[in-house]
Amino acid sequence: MKYYSTNKKAAPASLHEAVVKGLASDKGLYMPETIKRLPDSFFDSIADMSFPEIACQVADSFFGEDIPAETLKRIVYETLNFDVPLVKVQENIYSLELFHGPTLAFKDVGARFMARLLGYFIGLEGKQQVNVLVATSGDTGSAVANGFLGVDGIHVYVLYPKGKVSEIQEKQFTTLGKNITAIEIDGTFDDCQALVKQAFLDEELNRQMKLTSANSINVARFLPQAFYYFYAYAQLKKMKKADEVVVCVPSGNFGNITAGLFAQQMGLPVKRFIAANNRNDVFYRYLETGKYEPCASVPTIANAMDVGAPSNFARIYDLYHRSFEEIRSHIAGAWYTDEQIAEEVQKVYNETGYLLDPHGACGYRALQENLKENETGVFLETAHPAKFRDTIERILGQKIAIPEKLTTFMAGKKQSVPMTKDFGDFKKFLLSQR
Ligand SMILES: *Cc1c(COP(=O)(O)O)cnc(C)c1O
């Protein structure tokens, strides 16, 4: 299958090219030329299928033309070596727990899949090392670094904003060593993202080194996120709760929700989506006004959603034929202040015993406020609350349990390269690494 750029100027690419390049040469995001509908028989039997079985079918419709069936199956099974349970929080509201992977966040799914797919393509190419550049506002860095750790022929550079990610998040990508280098930028997440984007467009750098992205813009990270929307539906269907499903996604760069919108195009019966934001409400304002006006991000306690210019807006815009009406008919919006997020974490914990993380809290609250009678709501619990330990403990006024996976990271020693947000410095550093 070919992948075209949302800017429509670059020539369509093969999957191999799209995965290795990340961003198209015209700065657009790659989109698959067709989104195949899955057959009715798939949805008839979905409730009896396992998560990897479902994912294999979905993966086949995206990648089946381009990757041998056995390889694709192996990649799917290796990626999904953890469960994604749907947990009831209250009547008609369910949490899709995406935090049971190695770094306790949903990004493990896309990152693990991409590392393996890229590894496969590099194996076909032969020797040259591929350098993965990734900007992170917290969880991307850890998921990508851990997903790629020790994969031959790949070196990962993680750029993160100094002082703006939690200690636990930072430890998860600065303590690994091997083929992972962490770069601590004196700036914001948007500065990190700008450096990465500029590196991809720098001709000299690209002549000297093979660069690719592992941000949510890469199709190999973005598309596999569709897997768990189908699995959520399968679990609801088993409970006979799948008639009117509303899915709410805590959103930053909008990669996760866009994968859900793709799933819907493939036939997944979701009635509507809600994008939940923190004070970075660019998308919400777009839904209100029809004007998309990116701006600088502001820091919040749901920091993985502190994004002022969500990259995947370009995909949503393209998917719905640049029609404001069409976008509004598929997606509703909501946004919350830090005070509202904290209030929600506390309230839900007191009333149900379920501990939300600050991102999931936005999703839960948006369902609470928007769900109609007879509808069943699913929010994506995008990270384990212990990843935001300080925030959660401050809100609750008590200590919380830390999963063993996290304490292991905490014991490691931080190693990172300090850097300004000046592109010249970043470029010089990369060239020195060859
Ligand atoms: C990355 C992240 C988000 C935002 O996901 P997008 O795909 O960028 O919209 C939400 N919550 C958590 C915990 C994250 O790590």
Image (spheres, rainbow, N blue to C red):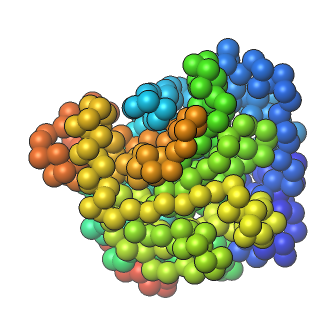
- Name the one closer to the observer, 405 or 378: 378
Q: What x and y, as percent, mark residue 291? A: 63, 80
Report the quarter where the C terminus lies: bottom right
Q: Is residue 339 above or below residue 390?
A: below
Q: In this view, does 195 lie above or below 236?
A: below
**Residue 243, picture quadrant:** top right
- Name the one closer to the observer, 251 or 106: 251
**Residue at the outermost top position:** 48
Q: Is residue 330 above or below residue 283?
A: above
Q: What x and y, as percent, mark residue 336? A: 38, 62
Disc tally is 0
Q: Is residue 289 left or right of residue 90?
A: right
**Residue at the outermost front position:** 373
- Name the one closer to the observer, 351 or 406: 351
Q: What x and y, as percent, mark residue 277? A: 46, 61
Q: Residue at left 28%, top 46%?
A: 345
Q: In this view, does 151 lie to the left or right of 177?
A: right
Q: Residue at left 33%, top 42%?
A: 356
Q: Is residue 350 left or right of residue 257?
A: left
Q: What x and y, as percent, mark residue 176? A: 37, 46
**Residue 301, picture quadrant:** bottom left
The answer to whether any part of residue 253 appears in the image is yes
Q: In this view, does 401 lie above or below 123?
A: above
The answer to whether any part of residue 209 appears in the image is no
- Name the one closer to the observer, 23 or 390: 390
Q: Residue at left 59%, top 58%?
A: 332
Q: Residue at left 36%, top 77%?
A: 187
